[in-house]
Amino acid sequence: MRALFLYTELAPYFLACVERLVKDFDLEVHIVRWPLNKEAPFQLKYADRVHMHERERFDDAALLSFATDLAPDIVFASGWVDKGYLKVCRALRSAAKPTVMCSDTAWRGDARQLAATIAARLWLKRTFSHAWVTGEAQARYARKLGFPPDAIRSGFYSADVDRFAPLFERFKMAKGAHFPHRFLCTARYIPTKGHQLLCDAFAELCTAGEAGDWELWIAGTGELRDQVMNSASGKHPRIKHLGFVQADAMPSALEQCGVFVLPSTYEPWGVVVHEHACSGFPLLLSSAVGARERFLREGENGHIFIAGDKGTLKNMLRMMILSTDDELRAMGETSAQLGRQWSPKQWCEVVMGLLGR
């Protein structure tokens, strides 16, 4: 059997799911991908029986011809941003193949989405048979678009649990002896991630003598990195900018940090939350982070603050700083338990269920 993924931006966590798929099932996988994002320069590794194809090598007609010749048993497409991908899905849908729209877009109810729900009903049913989304807000949008509830699956994103979950046990003894008083933010330096707000809030706590011995480390790169690094708060001596950290080097940073914080003002899901939950981190997430619905229980393994609001962010940072090390370790235990509840294994079961296997 063959599966075709028409993808936009590849990441290691997606490839971990695909690798599990080809290892556990008699399935051949083909992936058409967009060029690598310069703000996420991952060094990607591909499993045997995973065939990679560059989108830029196909015009729409050539892509349709490729997919028709391949004759996959199922096709997955990243949303509806690529019109060539839609043409492939429409052709395979007419051939009675399962065609799956994959999406992390949450329902917001704004004018643009309302217009999309009207327009989509004209073409969506003849293009996609199913929707595979990340969480409940995304499932709500899929229903608004016209997908019946029994054609919607959740859990489209999964962390590489086999990579991150063992880190919790590996670091348990060291963090039990001395819990690291460092916040870690792993995110691209782009406007919606809130780096400047985070630096401002943490620096103000330091200046007011309310940060104890805590530090803030930030991993990532992006268009705003130099601007944030060179800002008054970004240059604070207790804030460290790590740059982009490849997956193989991430455990070293995780071992030295204690609490994960993600201050995004727009974050439809956020696989990075799942990764840090698996690794046993207490979580401090903005109200805009979609993954909080699955991986954060308020007060049990972390806290939520109002997205874009420095006052509530400072309050939640302060709560973490004032927590005892035993309380922080207990939060980490809960995070690890929640993180293990969804994995590439369950992801593969969704794929095989859509194939009727």
Image: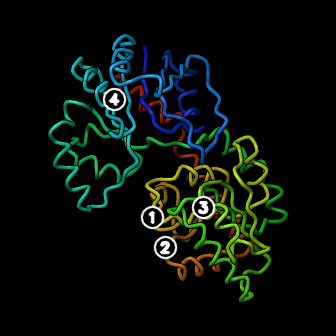
Residue annotated with mark 4: 84
Residue 122 lies in quadrant: top left
Residue annotated with mark 1: 288
Give me the disc on residue 66. none
Residue annotated with mark 3: 224
Q: Nearer the viewer, residue 61 or 259?
A: 61
Left or right: where does residue 173 sit relative to residue 310? Answer: right
In terms of sequence position, does the residue under pointer 4 or pointer 1 come before the other?
A: 4
Camera-side mark, 1 or 2: 2
Question: Pointer 3: residues within 10 angstroms few (<14), some, or many (20+)?
Answer: some
The structure residue drawn at horizontal position 71% and vertical position 48%, both measured from the top left corner, is: 245
Badge 3 amino acid? Leu
In terms of sequence position, does the residue under pointer 1 or pointer 2 come before the other?
A: 1
Inter-mark Cα distance, 4 to 3:
32 Å
Inter-mark Cα distance, 4 to 2:
37 Å
Question: Quick check: 42 above or below 322?
Answer: above
Give me the disc on residue 308. 2
Q: Nearer the viewer, residue 335 or 238?
A: 238
Q: Residue furthest top?
A: 69
- Quarter of the image with the N terminus in it: top left
Residues at badges 1 and 2 in contact (C-beta under 8 Å)? yes
The structure residue drawn at horizontal position 38% and vertical position 24%, both measured from the top left corner, is: 59
